[in-house]
Image (spheres, rainbow, N blue to C red):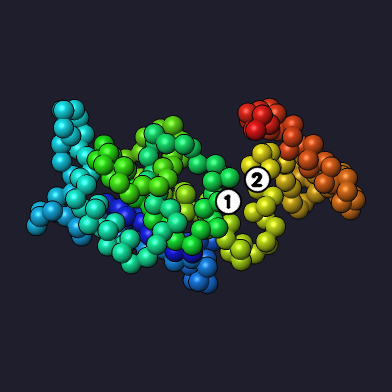
Amino acid sequence: MRIDIITVSPELIKSPFEYSIIKRAINKGFVEVHFHNLRDYALNKYGQIDDMQYGGGAGMVLMIEPIDKCMSKLLAERTYDEVIYMTPDAPTLNQQTANTLSLKENILILTGHYKGVDQRVRDKFITKEISIGDYVLSGGEIAAAVLCDAIIRLIPGVLGDETSALTDSFQDNLLAPPIYTRPSEYDGLKVPDVLLSGNFKKIDAWRHDQAYNKTQILKPDLLDE
């Protein structure tokens, strides 16, 4: 998989890709991640990429020309399965979306900044818009990093245990059940006996019941789906 990210602040987004699971995925060749500084496509020597919005109002808007130059260059080099814009006024990222995107070959992500981007960018280039929640960030870089993390960890071979991602919360519209590790008792707090029984049929049933009950209490809307 290849992921290209267009950003006003590449230094802000690079850090999450330099550690842990994502770094190992990159080093092992499971994914390529490329950052493109929008200011390299600025309109003038002052690095202008934004301007005031028509009709008045607070906040600067990313202009269409620099984005067009950058995207047109990338689109001429390869075909992208999705061109994604990170924005709070879009459908919220969920596990099903991450699953689908993890099967793609090439993804291009545009991160917003300031007040956002000229609507014509969204009309002309964007094939999918994604939010990570009903709140506003200073820019889309952190949101893009969240999306990439959710996608990359699902690529076969990235996680040490192939089944690990399949048992995560939301994969079957249930939250994950409680988990425990050694010691079996600590400060009077004990691990449930069933997990120590060695009876995997009972363990699976217990985990399912716990996951269902937890979901019913914390996120009952998932059960409706």
In the displayed structure, 32 sits above or below 141; it is: below
Residue with the mark numbered 1: 99
Nearer to the camera, 72 or 138: 72
Q: Secondary structure at mark 2?
A: loop
Mark seen at residue 171? 2
Residue at 19 percent across and 58 percent down: it is: 41
Q: Is residue 185 visible?
A: yes
The residue at the far bottom in this view is 28
Residue at 16 percent across and 28 percent down: it is: 55
Q: Position of residue 116 (x, y in %)?
A: 28, 39
Mark seen at residue 134? none
Please state which amino acid type lies under the numbered disc 2: Gln
Quote the CA–CA distance across marks 1 and 2.
Answer: 9 Å
Nearer to the camera, 110 or 218: 110
**Mark count:** 2
Question: How would you rate the neighbour count of disc 2 (Cα within 10 Å): few for under 14, some for 14-19, many for 20 or more?
Answer: some
Q: Position of residue 35 (x, y in %)?
A: 34, 61
Q: Position of residue 156 (x, y in %)?
A: 61, 63
Question: How would you rate the neighbour count of disc 1 (Cα within 10 Å): few for under 14, some for 14-19, many for 20 or more?
Answer: some
In the displayed structure, 84 sits above or below 188; it is: below
Residue at 32 percent across and 55 percent down: it is: 6
